[in-house]
Image (cartoon, rainbow, N blue to C red):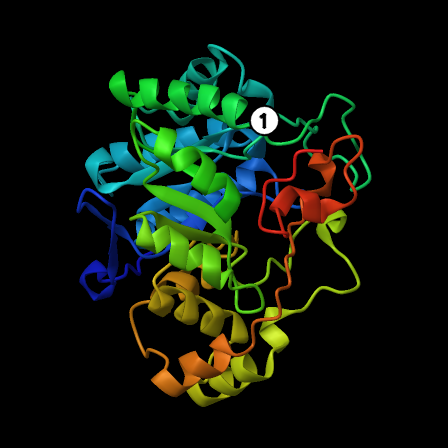
Amino acid sequence: MSETLDRSLLPVRKLYTGEEIPCVGLGTFGSDKYGAEQVSQAVYGAIRYGYRLIDCAAVYQNEDSIGEVLQRVMQEGAVERKELFVTSKVWNDMHGEGKVLESCRKSLQDLRLDYLDLYFVHWPFPNYHAPGCSGDSRNPDSRPFSVEEFMATWRQCEELVDKGLVRYIGMSNMTIPKLEAVLPLCRIQPAALEMELHPSFQQKELFAYALEHNILPIGYCPIGSPSRPERDRTEEDVADTELPAVLAAAEAHGVHPAIICLKWAVQRGQVPIPFSVKENQYISNLKSAAEDPLTEEEMKAIEAEDKNCRLIKGQVFLWEGAKDWEDLWDVEGVITTC
């Protein structure tokens, strides 16, 4: 690849410390369709083109391959470590005492890094499911959210910052009731909240709540995750790239509807982390933030397309006695405890 993006054209986002980070990142969840080699090669090409934020996770089972690529691209002089913003996440089976440190060290070893820029608690409970399991799979040991259990895990994340292994820590897949319960207890506040965000699922209240608390929203499934696993698909799902306002903007700008979803995300203020192993797609995804912004009218039209359509429902994490996947998301405005 000879083409590189002029990074001065890209907007930036600020963390609560004032540090600036990229406005678009590269997701690395292969979604059961792409192996570690394909994902890591996309990371290599993406960094060479201009990506600097790489969103990883232990459960994606590709951090070792990504680590080889990170080492290679730095050895080639394409980027310095301080220019990259690399995230990872502790998986649900590693919430126990001392396990978070073990998980973080394993990710650092696999990624061949001395520190992580941001480390998330991937899901707010220790409800394990095996990677690639079916949508109706359930773990008999699963249980509802517990403030005490979550804070025990968060305290371990805070220790990672103390030890210099992690620069920032974050939360993921949270709700307002859960945040209200745990934020006052945090010694180190979350720098970011990773959450599902796309035109048909805008999470306006949670998005506003995060910003009010100086927590940067990082949006996964920014174009509606057309490659998501079958276990995460239902007949009621809405395709973001087929929404009328998205299609109208795509025609007006002469681009694919997916690019409109990303422009909307960047201009709204979240950090989208689209995934693609295809060079033309990940190039277009980053370039979308650097040119030809949406008009105010187009932004408002897309805002009106919100369908409250959650795609990643998390049903594999349900516990015995739970009614349905909505219990994971506190839809009644209180933490579901039974």
Percent position of residue 94, x then y: 55, 19
Relative to 286, is 9 on the left or the right? Answer: left
**Picture quarter containing residue 112?**
top left
How many circles with numbers are drawn on the protein?
1
Q: Residue at x 79, y 43 (%)?
A: 323
Percent position of residue 249, x then y: 47, 84
As drawn, 242 above or below 222: below
Quarter of the picture containing the C terminus is top right
As drawn, 103 above or below 68: above
Q: Return the residue at label 1.
A: 92
Q: Residue at x 40, y 18 (%)?
A: 156
Q: Which residue is drawn at 72% across and 46% down?
A: 325
Percent position of residue 69, x then y: 40, 34
**Closer to us: 72 or 236:** 236
**Picture quarter containing residue 241?**
bottom right
For the question of whether residue 11 can be seen, the reply is yes
Relative to 64, is 53 on the left or the right? Answer: left
Relative to 64, is 226 on the left or the right? Answer: right
